[in-house]
Image (cartoon, rainbow, N blue to C red):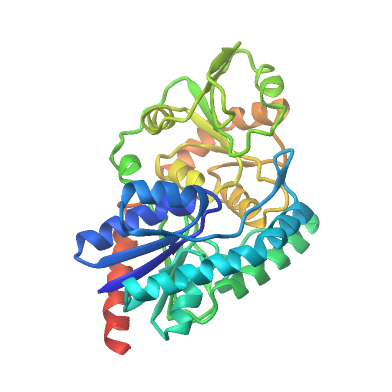
């Protein structure tokens, strides 16, 4: 089967998850072409040379480690016209070189629109649709209700009317819409293959290097050792070791950490749960999806949800590590078996129906 696969460029989680699925599809003999943008394009083009077409996508603007709603709107408005022209040219290029039988989108618009225009079967694979197609069991703070409604409407409008929605999630949720299937998180081979141990350090993964309080907060716990990725520096400051990103080094430090600190990104949190690492989560402000992930971490007893990185909050989190570790032992996942089984089922059904 010829498959067009769309991956958004904002955030690397989509790209790393999609890479796992694309490798699986190629291994099954399918012919896959990929459309993506920004850092995700660079990453996927290196992994699948000759299969990736660069498009222009949506991007967030950040200010002091928070999403700027105004900045994000202005940034994308500024580039909207030229991006539309550019993507139209890519549509024509794709039509000349490839005739897909089916489209898979990981919350990516170009591939979705292409599938609709050509009346192709559409499969959505992402974690975002849980907000729209399932009932959430978390309590939503009053100050987050507006963010929730905005996020829910964006998710609802992003890729409507797909033939199947495969939602990856580390938590269970009640499905409320048809053609919706909950699967476990997509785990990279490198994470699946590693054997977790418990060292003495705490790993911090920071997606925005603009957070200014990291050293000031972590230095207040001098008896703890911290390894921090994402701050774009390689140096030691007291009890904090900052490292530049290296996949091998990062996975080694991740697998041997006694706990982790992060925002609320789905991919990292999912891998932490898979490796049974207690999670201190402080979501990026104005991103409800991150708030939701952090809230579920606390609801399940896998860690704590805080509004900020703080010394007192860290002490509280570390005090309860034994409880979190015990709760995490109940989580079970056999690689990507559930996802691939459901994906194969949908490919067979949709391949015959259209």
Quadrant containing the N terminus is bottom left
Q: Quadrant of residue 22?
A: bottom left
Residue at (62, 51) in percent of width and height: 290
Identify whether 302 is placed above or below 223. below
**Nearest the eye: 251 or 44:** 44
Query: For this rendering, which residue is in front, 241 or 201?
Result: 241
The answer to whether one can see residue 12 in this image is no
Residue 347 visible in the displayed image: yes
Percent x, y for residue 73?
74, 59
Quadrant for the C terminus in the image: bottom left
Which residue lies at the image location 31% right of the left edge and 34% below the top edge?
195
Q: Quadrant of residue 242?
A: top right
Looking at the rendered structure, the number of numbered marks drawn on it comes to 0
Q: Is residue 145 left or right of residue 324?
A: right
Q: Residue furthest bottom?
A: 353
Q: Residue at x 39, y 56 (%)?
A: 18
Q: Front-most of 92 and 69?
A: 92
Task: Identify whether 99 is placed above or below 24.
Answer: below
Query: Percent from the top left, x then y, of residue 29?
Result: 19, 65
Q: Position of residue 297 (x, y in %)?
A: 57, 48
> Would you say 105 lies left or right of 282 here?
left
Task: Pinpoint residue 96: horizontal percent, then vertical percent.
Answer: 35, 75
């Amino acid at each position: 089967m010829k498959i067009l696969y769309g991956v958004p460029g904002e955030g690397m989680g989509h790209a790393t998850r999609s890479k796992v699925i694309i490798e699986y599809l190629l291994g099954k003999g399918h012919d896959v072409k990929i459309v993506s943008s920004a850092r995700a394009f660079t990453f996927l083009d290196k992994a699948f040379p000759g299969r990736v077409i660069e498009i222009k996508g949506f991007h967030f603007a950040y200010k002091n480690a928070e999403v700027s709603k105004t900045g994000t709107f202005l940034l994308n408005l500024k580039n909207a016209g030229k991006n539309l022209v550019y993507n139209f040219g890519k549509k024509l290029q794709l039509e000349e070189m490839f005739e897909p039988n089916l489209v898979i989108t990981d919350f990516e618009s170009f591939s979705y629109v292409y599938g609709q225009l050509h009346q192709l079967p559409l499969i959505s694979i992402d974690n975002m649709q849980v907000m729209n197609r399932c009932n959430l069991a978390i309590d939503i703070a009053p100050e987050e209700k507006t963010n929730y409604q905005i996020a829910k409407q964006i998710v609802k409008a992003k890729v409507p009317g797909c033939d199947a929605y495969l939602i990856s999630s580390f938590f269970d949720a009640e499905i409320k819409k048809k053609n919706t299937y909950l699967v476990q998180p997509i785990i990279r081979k490198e994470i699946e293959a590693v054997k977790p141990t418990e060292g003495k350090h705490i790993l911090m993964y920071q997606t925005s290097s603009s957070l200014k309080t990291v050293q000031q907060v972590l230095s207040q716990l001098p008896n703890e050792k911290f390894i921090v990725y994402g701050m774009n520096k390689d140096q030691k400051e007291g009890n904090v070791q900052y490292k530049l990103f290296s996949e091998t080094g990062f996975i080694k430090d991740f697998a041997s950490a006694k706990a982790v600190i992060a925002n609320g990104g789905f991919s990292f949190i999912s891998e932490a749960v898979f490796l049974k690492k207690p999670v201190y989560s402080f979501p990026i402000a104005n991103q409800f999806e991150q708030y939701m992930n952090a809230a579920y971490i606390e609801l399940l007893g896998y860690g704590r949800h805080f509004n900020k990185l703080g010394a007192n909050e860290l002490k509280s989190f570390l005090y309860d590590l034994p409880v979190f570790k015990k709760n995490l032992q109940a989580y079970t996942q056999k690689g990507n078996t559930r996802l691939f089984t459901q994906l194969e089922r949908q490919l067979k059904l949709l391949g015959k129906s259209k």
